[in-house]
Image (cartoon, helix red, strand yellow):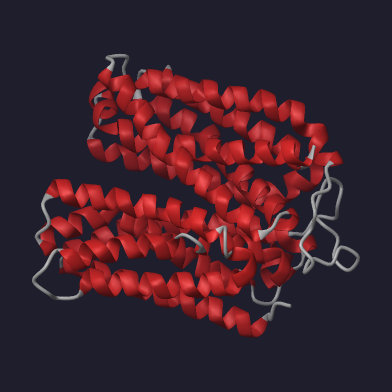
Amino acid sequence: MYSLLLAIIYIAFVSLGLPDSLVGAGWPVMHQDLGVPIASAGIITMIIAGGTILSSLASERLTRRFGVGVVTAVSVALTAAALAGFSFSGAFWMLCLWAIPYGLGAGAVDAALNNYVAVHYAARHMNWLHACWGLGASISPFIMSFALTAGAGWSSAYITVAVLQAVLTVALLFSIPLWRKVNPLVPAHHHEAEDEAPGKGAAHVPLAQALRIRGVWLILTAFFAYCALESTVILWASTYLVTDRGVDAATAAAFASLFLLGITAGRFLAGFVADRIGDRWMIRGGFLAVGLGVLLLGLPVQTTALPLIGLVITGLGCAPIYPAIIHSTPTSFGRRNSQAIIGVQMAAAYTGSTLAPPLFGVLSAWSGMWILPLFLAVLMLLGLLMSERLSRLVPQS
């Protein structure tokens, strides 16, 4: 049963990534069919982000009331229904409507699954599971590309992913008893007798109480900074390489995709050493590697090789940070509090991912695209300093 549940969780993480790239991959065609400006994609993503933040904050109460298995199954069902709704939408307002359950489903399942894995599984699984998210996010653009190339239209890509999500929903519904019966091996640093694991029926930890726990604001700031950095690179790196470093558009696009592939591959590799190195060193080493990558990205030298190498190193450095922050949460703040804190962490992550790219867009319009490495360096230093302060404030055993 343990192996079966673990397999289902891995598939669920692939499923988490599948919808995330669909809007961006299909929007060049979608906005024409719907008769809206290309910038309208920002409205869709803002609605999705808003729903995700709300459901992340509510995930602790929902998980304690209904259990991880039920929350996961219902959340995936919500995203499946929303994706099916996208496929049948013939007007922009319909996309906006379906974006609401899309975001609500994504946030709840993200927080619930991340906490379950952080509490019950070793660090290597957290890294490999987040690599599976990257795999899912990489697959969906190919689904959209195939649908458009075959002449089936963007709606067929959405219905394809919706069907995949629906199949996973059925599997999750049948797996609900496993979440209650399976008792995975808990890492030795989690003391069950002293700090009960969160689960169905356990005492609720109010948001205000979670935010008052020592060190929580430090990790929230670090998480916000990391996700802001990652999303800014994803959106703006290719433009920076072309406008300020003289890289041709095709090469810039290829290396921008290598940033995401670097994150995915880096998480697979990190899984082999995470248990030996520990979460704190994975976070520290990740931020330092990002710093090296950003330095190479911004060095004022007459060569295109260094910024391209810097972008790849930045992706590899980003790889272990997100999984390690999540996995360290039960150890730093207690298993009883971890679901509430991880829910707030997800909200901080989505807030950073939503606000940072447009903020950089405004700044670059005023000063020029050359400030990208400086912007990234500030976020890197903020994340590193906050995580180091937490290491001194809340030592891990």
Give coordinates of residue 27: x percent, y percent.
29, 32
Closer to us: 90 or 154? 154
Q: Is residue 379 visible?
A: no
Residue positioned 43% across, 62% down in the render: 318
- Counting labels gives 0
Residue furthest bottom in the image: 392
Is 345 above or below relative to 163? below
| Quadrant the C terminus occupies | bottom right
**Rendering quarter of residue 209:** bottom right
- Find the residue positioned furthest to the right: 193
Q: Give coordinates of residue 197: x percent, y percent.
A: 82, 57
User: Which quadrant holds the N terminus?
Assistant: top right
The percent coordinates of residue 193 (x first, y second) are: 91, 65
Q: Is residue 351 above or below residue 307?
A: above
Q: Along the line of sight, which residue is nearer the eye, 77 or 317?
A: 317
x 25%, y 72%: residue: 296
> Is 206 displayed left or right of 291 in the figure?
right
Which residue is at 55% across, 31% downward? 79
178 lies left or right of 167: right
Q: Position of residue 299 (x, y in %)?
A: 19, 75
Q: Is residue 392 above or below residue 293?
A: below
> Could you say which is closer to the camera, residue 295 or residue 387?
295
Residue 81, by quadrant, is: top right
Residue 265, visible in the rendered structure: yes
